[in-house]
Image (cartoon, rainbow, N blue to C red):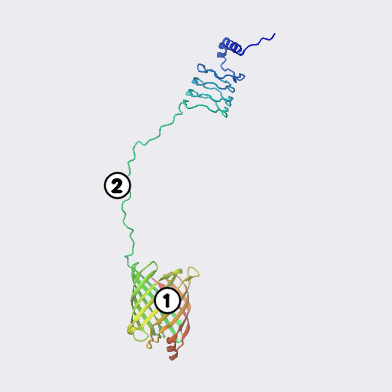
Amino acid sequence: MITRISVPSALALVVSFSALHAGSASAAGEMDHSQMNHGQMQGMDHGQMDHGQMQGMDHGQMQGMDHGKMDHSQMQGMDHSQMNHGQMQDMDHGQMNHGQMQGMDHGQMNHGQMQGMDHGQMNQGSAEAAPAATSRTPIPVLTDADREAAFPPLPGHGIHDSKVNTFFLLDQLEYQDADEGSVLSWDASGWIGGDIDRLWLRSEGERTNGVTEEAEVQALWGHSIGPWWDVVTGVRQDFKPGSPQTWGAFGLQGMALYAFEAEATAFVGENGQTAARLEGDYDILLTNRLILQPTAEANFYGKNDHERGVGSGLANTEVGLRLRYEILREFAPYIGVTWSRSYGNTADMLREDGEDVEEARFVAGIRMWF
């Protein structure tokens, strides 16, 4: 005959058996729950349970346990490494005291399915947020007086435009092999003044076989109208050819694109004579010291002047090419060639006197500045 035992009776029998062996279980030091089936232990109240000696417990199948009133203050050294929390759903940890849960090993715990757990009221011991740090000395509000003290008004940058400087350039002092004989030619310029206003001096001329054929001097006041350009105005005095003649002068000089130096000057002379002169030169650096310089000059007159041998319109042009070597930056010997030609009425006057209207010359000279 088979005797059937109901579930409540079995539970009562287990509880009675556990009570008989309570003493031996307390002394065991390490309770083994690894084979216990907690799958149906739902709603169990652990509120009064003493877990002080519950080391090595396997809670892998404990579902729906109420830990709300559990005292974990003595649960030190409990190994949860094998606990399976995969089914621990809706577990309420709201009232759990974890203050003394030191040394608990959760290294192997599976929290993959721990959904719906309420940790809102958990006491995490020392895991409270530290108060925000504040300055011991309050930072004062920045005022206009503070800004003025930090950024006082500064004086303007001093410039040296009021200083008087000087410059002199002997651009050409050369010997020329001309048809009439040996020619000494010069072309010089210089200035004295500041960065804005300067007194310019110019002079050029020729001496053929020891006789001065052409000579003039200009004194011009120059005013800077930009970084590279000056307006000049002043007087020009011719000594040769013919009788001395004085001109008023007005012009523009400076440096155009690509360091091309240019001068354009208009003259008004005695007896209503007018004239204009265009000049330019450019330095081509073959090396740092070997420099090729092309030059060009053109002269125009308003009316014929037989005494000086010039006619109205374009009177003459001259182009040259000089190669210099700068032994010092301030001193350079050079050699070159020039070619000049007369036009219009000026050419006719030369033909009447039996002279050539064009001529090429070999030149050699020095260039220096200081």
- First reached walking from the N terminus: tag 2 or tag 1: 2
* Cα distance between the residues tagged 2 and 1: 61 Å
Residue displayed at 35% across by 73% down: 232
Q: Quadrant of residue 332?
A: bottom left
Examine the rendering and report whether any part of residue 328 can be seen.
Answer: no
Q: Which mark is residue 145?
A: 2
Total count of labels? 2
Q: Quadrant of residue 137?
A: top left
Q: Is residue 17 left or right of residue 160?
A: right
Q: Position of residue 19 (x, y in %)?
A: 56, 10
Nearest the camera: 3 or 57?
Answer: 3
Assign the N terminus to one quadrant of the image: top right
Dot 2 crowding, Cα within 10 Å, few <14, some 14–19, many 20+: few
Which disc number belongs to residue 127?
A: none
Residue 351 visible in rendering: yes
Q: Amino acid at mark 1?
A: Glu
Q: Which residue is mark 1?
A: 279
Q: Is residue 295 above or below residue 37?
A: below
The answer to which of 340 and 43 lies nearer the viewer is 43
Quarter of the image for the C terminus: give it: bottom left
Disc 1 element: strand
Most foreground residue, 177 or 80: 80
Q: Position of residue 88 (x, y in %)?
A: 56, 25
Q: Amino acid at mark 2?
A: Ala
